Amino acid sequence: MAFDELQQFRDTYITECMELLADMETRLMGLDAGAGKEELNAIFRCAHSIKGGAGAFGFSAIAGFTHILEALLDQMREGKIAVNRQVTDLLLKARDIVLHMVAAARDHAALPENYGQDVAAALSRLCEMPGQAAPLVKGAEPKTGLVTYRILFRPHAEMIAHGSEPLLLLRELGKLGECGVATDSSKVPPLHALDVEQCYLGWAITLATEKGEAAIREVFEFVDGECELVIEAKAMEAAKAPEAAAEPAAAEPQKGTASIRVDIDKVDRLINMVGEMVIIQAMLAMQSKFLTTQAGPTEELLRGIDELSAHTRELQEAVMAIRMQPVKSIFSRMPRLVRDLSGQLGKSIRLSMSGENTEVDKTIIEQLADPLTHMLRNSIDHGIEAPAEREAAGKPAMGTILLSASHRGGRIIIEVRDDGAGIRRDKVLAKAKERGIVPKDAVLSEAEIDQLIFAPGFSTAEQVTNISGRGVGMDVVKRNIEGIGGTVTVTNMPGAGTQFVVSLPLTLAILDGMIVRVASECYIIPIANIIESLRPRREDVRQLADGQTVLNIRGNILPMLYVHRLFRVAGAVQDAASALVVMVENGHEQIGLVVDELVGQQQVVIKTLEDNTDPVAGVSGATILGDGKVSLILDIAGLRRMNHAPSPHLLAA
């Protein structure tokens, strides 16, 4: 087998290991809630699959460690070892050891020679503990005697080329009981036509075992979809060696898998190509309007362009759907976080999750992990009270954190809500004044005080710990979320808890935007940020003492930003009453952007600037319009920061 092919299968194995370990962690967390035997069987299968592949690829450390883990899980399945928090803690540590081993194999990194030996020793000691024979797992059942199974196993021709060895599977099957094997060689071609990387043999096996059909299927789990497999149970018998079977009958092939693995680079390349098609389609649509007024194109040409637009939109939506992933991949990490931190702090906390299958672009998911982790840590450390304090306040000793995801108005909404003490506004304001975040004589509204938790360097912790106190948490949350076009808001319910709401775009590749003109320049404002547009009356525009221009709209005072001043565009309309004001929002904040003209709405393909230049303040990306010109996409949060603290070198960019 060529080196590149072997590397490909090795990479596939490592990817599958990461998925299995993520599933294992989720299922291990369920043991605390009294999961049954099926859950233990699934955890055992994860360890078994990792061990089998590790041996095939020469990862001896992984194979040795998972063998010990597998032995413990097997005893737990049989009800010989009790499931309790201490055992679950050890299993979680073992899972983390395997994760680090797999990551080291992936990165070609070396771990210390004795890495994980203390946990392996603890697993072995637990396996040897006597006096745990009672069925301690819900659903554990006693053995009911030997059952004879007839197994028809025929690998697909390419199974060996994919790195799976049938002989190893047959040997593993032999460990389950007494078996006899007959070989079907009817499909072996003449010698001159043999391909050494293909498998032509099949086997008929009779197996007498107490383990059950699930244990048999575990042996073949790693080659699921790469073989034809039929397992039939016969009547229960006394233990005896089975006879070898006759030639196997034709077996019905297993149903093929419903999904395939595709390298993400290939998906990104496809999305980029579709993005270019969207741009070309917009150019054709613009040219068709020009031709209509000048040359009178035929109706067939116009109809063809309309159909192209519809098909391009449909293709674009289909391709974008490929990159959509459920937020479950991020949510599944959070129960472990809550479990570990609540244990460190001596608190009792239950995490309730909903909407885990809500889908969002994978690029959004990748950047959501850190902000979500910060918010949960904040709720665990600062929100939920200690059990005694909760009981004194008439609350249950166990606190609750709700984590949910949903789609609303073309965006994804993530909510984190706890039933803790809420934000103590007096303490927050005092700490903000102490740290110079607000002036000593500042008088703030309740909503403004709540927003102080997002200020850089703010923290109410009395001392720095490994959990909190450095004042980087919620500031990082706000900046990271705004960096991907989202917003985060907080609702404070003193004595009853705190709610954080994160609103994010579904994708970072394409957005619906409003094209606005400022002098000869065109900019894109995301439609999701726009509230309304209007031409203000002159008497509603006011100049404050600090030079800030505000707009009185229906009794609400709205700060205004002149786009031509922020980006130093010459020739723009100077008077707001003669221009247009586009009201936009970013979380709780609303501002008015002064522009010359609304050009029209258009779906635009986002092109990042950071591959070729430093970040530009107030700009989240760029796009190519139908006339072929480049237009900048405005970052509403960035514009607001530019107005508060302008930076000449960034404005010049």
Image (cartoon, grey):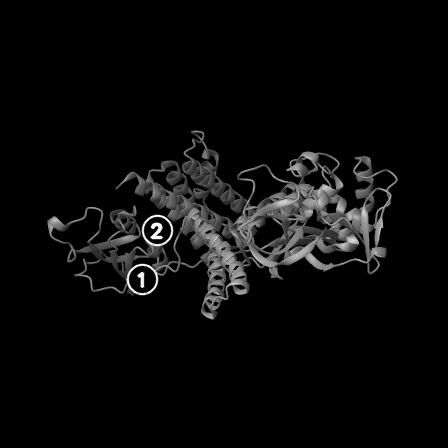
Q: Which mark is residue 77?
A: none
Frontmost residue, 85 versus 301: 301
| Side (left or right) of 10 relative to 307 | left
Q: Position of residue 286 (x, y in %)?
A: 54, 59
Q: CA distance from mark 1 to mark 2?
A: 14 Å
Check disc 1 and report the residue beneath it: 254
Describe the element under mark 2 as helix, strand or loop: helix
Instruction: Say which residue appears at 31% left-offset and 62% top-offset.
Output: 254
Residue kind at label 1, given as amino acid type: Gln
User: Which numbered disc flags the more N-terminal residue, 1 or 2?
Assistant: 2
Q: Mark yes or no: residue 141 visible.
A: yes
Q: Find residue 188 and report its image quarter.
A: bottom left
Q: Position of residue 564 (x, y in %)?
A: 71, 46
Residue kind at label 2, given as amino acid type: Phe
Q: Position of residue 347 (x, y in %)?
A: 67, 46
Instruction: Say which residue appears at 83% left-offset and 56% top-offset.
Output: 538
Check disc 2 and report the residue beneath it: 222
Instruction: Say which residue appears at 84% left-offset and 51% top-offset.
Output: 542
State whether residue 14 is above or below residue 492. Answer: above
**Callout 2: 10 Å neighbours few (<14), some, many (20+)?**
some
Q: Position of residue 247 (x, y in %)?
A: 17, 61
Q: Mark yes or no: residue 80 visible.
A: no
Describe the element under mark 1 as helix, strand or loop: loop
**Callout 1: 10 Å neighbours few (<14), some, many (20+)?**
few
Frontmost residue, 283 versus 7: 283
State whether residue 492 is above or below residue 118. Answer: below
Instruction: Say which residue appears at 26% left-offset and 57% top-offset.
Output: 207
State whether residue 102 is above or below residue 581. Answer: above
- The tally of labels here is 2
Q: Residue furthest bottom?
A: 299
